[in-house]
Amino acid sequence: MKVVIAAGGTGGHLYPGIAIAREVLAEAGNEVLFVGTEQGIEARVLPKESLPVQFITVGRLKGMSTRSIVKTIITMPRSLFRSVGLLRRERPDAVVGVGGYASGPVALAAWLLRAPLIIVEPNSYAGLANRVLGRFAKTVFVCFPGRDQQGFFPTQKKVLTGPLVRKGITGGDRNRAVAAFGLDPARFTVFVMGGSGGAHAINMAMKEAAPELKGIPGLQVLHQTGEKDVEDVKDGYQRAGVKAAVLPYIHDMAGAYAAADLVVSRSGATTVAELAVCGKRAVLIPYPFAADNHQEHNARSLAERGGGEVIVQKDLTPSKLAAVIQRYARGEGGTPSPLPSTAAEEIVRACKHHVQKD
């Protein structure tokens, strides 16, 4: 079975696509091909993952200037034409759209060519592309359902699953993971991240909160800052006397989650799904400029299930953040039960079902 996966632009779309790809490739003889854009995160990540990718040119619609939107609309027929040509050459057995810039034309091309089309929505609030494409799909998988999602997709096509995450993200040994980051296994560990590139607002809030964090007994911090803020944040912890491991990027995310007693982070689809599956308490600070404000929807969906709490960025202050962390360090607040993750297996089974049926 050969599956084309249209996903990318951001990690929230790409990493669920990678989880699906790994499940497809778990069976001998299967093939996958990603389709994305050269401007998206997929251009950097997929070669490192040894996953094949081809690129098309397609622009954005949400959050862009009028000029950029007009340009995108004008180039849409060309993007669709190239997507049709790509699918004719590759002859996939199924096409999976996970959202992102490339998902639109590739999914429409699949529908025009009568190739089985499956749409996967990893966010709690569906993106524009998936809301439209769900009407053309054979099946729509909703991986982290929220109350606002229910009317977006035809009921007869919709399948609710658990979070869609890459295998191996759970099950790490906490003591070993903490020691690997040069920290103390006996201390309460706060893992801070803002996505692969970091989040400046969170970085600065933690740096400025450091003098207050110093007063919390037995606390230490593991902080992924991104490249720009790493030295500034490291200096802030050192000046305050807070034990911390500050890194621009953390490759061993399974180890970071295993080490964490509390996570402070943005709330993209991948992050929220991984927190749910790992059963981690979290302080979620949604990126306020995400399309359709989907990060806040993700965060509140997790919080409603007992997975932590939400601080919107306009309300974020160093003192407020330090106070919330202190509450968790004192042992207040329960620990959520991990959610099962079988979404990738269900999606691959659906691909096989539609291939056999068609």
Image (cartoon, rainbow, N blue to C red):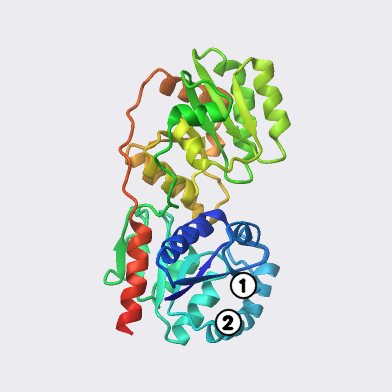
- Separation (CA) of disc 1 from disc 2: 9 Å
Query: Height in image: 78 above or below 121?
Result: below
Count of picture labels: 2
**Nearer to us in this view, 59 or 348:** 348
**Residue type at numbered disc 2:** Leu
Density class for disc 2 (Cα within 10 Å; few <14, some 14-19, many ≥20) is some
Residue at image coords 33%, 31%: 335
Q: Residue 219: give x, y in percent of width and height.
A: 51, 19
Tell me what residue is drawn at x 37 percent, y 52 percent: 163
Q: Quadrant of residue 158?
A: bottom left
Identify which residue, 34 or 322, lies in the foreground.
Answer: 34
Give SS at disc 2: helix
Q: Which residue is mark 2?
A: 86
Instruction: Give the vertical position of 355 relative to 317 (above or below).
Output: below
> Which label was assigned to residue 54?
1
Res 151 seen here: no
Q: Is there CB contact under 8 Å for labels 1 and 2? A: yes
Instruction: Indicate the quadrant containing the C terminus: top left, top right, bottom left or bottom right.
Output: bottom left
Q: Is residue 58 above or below residue 320?
A: below
The furthest residue to the front: 28
